Image (spheres, rainbow, N blue to C red):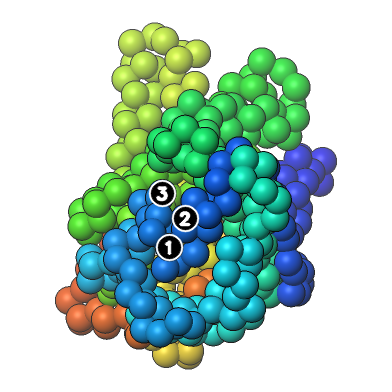
Amino acid sequence: MSGILPGLGLLVLAVAMLWALMAAPIGTRTFRVQARIRAPKAKLWQALHPFGDFANWYGAYVAVERIDDAHGRVQINWDGRDGKPIEREFELSDVVDGERFTMRTTEDNSLAMSFWEHHAHSVALAGADGDVTVTLSETDRYRGAAFFLFRYFAMRRQASKLRQWAETGTVTRGGVFEHPLTQFAMAGLSALILWPFFGLTREGFLLSVALTIVVGLHELGHMVAFRIMGHRSTRMIFIPVLGGLALGGRPYNTHFEVAFSAIMGAGMSVFIASLAFAASFLLQATGYREAAQAAAVFALICALFNLGNLVPVWKFDGGQALRQIMRGRLTQALASFAALAAFMGVGLAAGASLQAMLIAGAVFAVLSVMTAGSGVKPRTPLKPATAAEKGAIAAAFAATFAAHACVLIWSVGQVL
């Protein structure tokens, strides 16, 4: 039992964080961000009002069309499923010229309107020219803290960029968080947080670093998939303890795209695990036993992490892929149970105890229930996958699972 306590502790911590970020019942919340700006009040009003002369000061809009004094249509600088700018209609209320307004989205050609049902964005200006206090506020209903925190920090950035533009006449795009150096720092922080779970030793630190590298390579596979599917931009965000997140440049358009992008994280990592597998053999044959052992450990971590991602949890890669090729509830359930049984069988073959595998299965079941049904729904259904595409994804899933399973079972034998 003591041998599985560190892993069990890490799983419990991850589950608690996922619940807080994705499922905690936060309810309807309003947050406000204020900024004091040395600029003419009229200039700020023209920048913040959607019909203002400087409404596109940050480049967020492609075009704004006035329908009447209280309604408008905007194309935002973000690609939709068809590669064209997303279009939304909005309604203005509580308008006091030069002082305040509230804006609500009434139509969206990308997202289901349930996404905007409780949302409102408000702007208020107070003070005199040269010393204006701008208050930005956002109201919405939230499930989990992740999106709440995202919006809060996005609004803080908007206020900071507004001050920069109003006071200097120029504005820089992007921010510190998505800068590559920041993401490297987040990866380093993740390795440090994971270190105690592997033991506060040199070997434990190397294991935590190896796991962090494996996470980065896994997310790189998703980014490659996005590029193959035509996304014009991709990026990676590290989330300490939970791993990483690869983001594409537009919403998904087809079920095949969802499945392909999901499977490519573990799919690309097959090559990494296989290289570590081959390197271990070569190093062992040439007498470099310590290096061979290190390569086997890396192969073990890579295979175990990617197999874990193929488990049919709703938000994991395996769950994402299986839901696209099995569209009925019964077939989804059967495929999920089969995949979970295969995962537990691999664990038992690798030497894990039945108790440990039952605990892991219970944790995965809790994760799946927690995240089921979460996510943003598109305005119109995704394009269905063809029979050939479903067959290709099923074959890719099976091959990827089998490859990582073989590496895992072999590497456990080498390491232990």
Report x, y in % for residue 257: 28, 67
Residue to which mark 2 is pinned: 47
Helix, strand or loop at label 2? It is helix
Q: What is the spatial separation of the Cα atoms under label 1 and label 2, in whole angstroms?
A: 6 Å
Helix, strand or loop at label 3? It is loop
- Quadrant of residue 96 in the image? bottom right
Q: Which mark is residue 404?
A: none
**Does label 2 or label 3 sit earlier along the sequence?**
2
Residue 411 in sight from this viewpoint: no
Question: In the displayed structure, does residue 46 sit left or right of residue 128?
Answer: left
Label 1 environment density (alpha carbons within 10 Å; few <14, some 14–19, many ≥20): some
Amino acid type of the residue that numbered disc 1 sits on in the rendered structure: Gly
Report x, y in % for residue 358: 70, 63
Residue to which mark 1 is pinned: 52
Label 3 environment density (alpha carbons within 10 Å; few <14, some 14–19, many ≥20): some
Which residue of the protein is positioned furthest toward the left in this rendering?
388
Q: What is the spatial separation of the Cα atoms under label 2 and label 3, in whole angstroms?
A: 9 Å
Report x, y in % for residue 334: 48, 82
- Residue at 56 percent across and 27 percent down: it is 185
Q: What is the spatial separation of the Cα atoms under label 3 and label 1, in whole angstroms?
A: 13 Å
- Quadrant of residue 216 in the image? top left
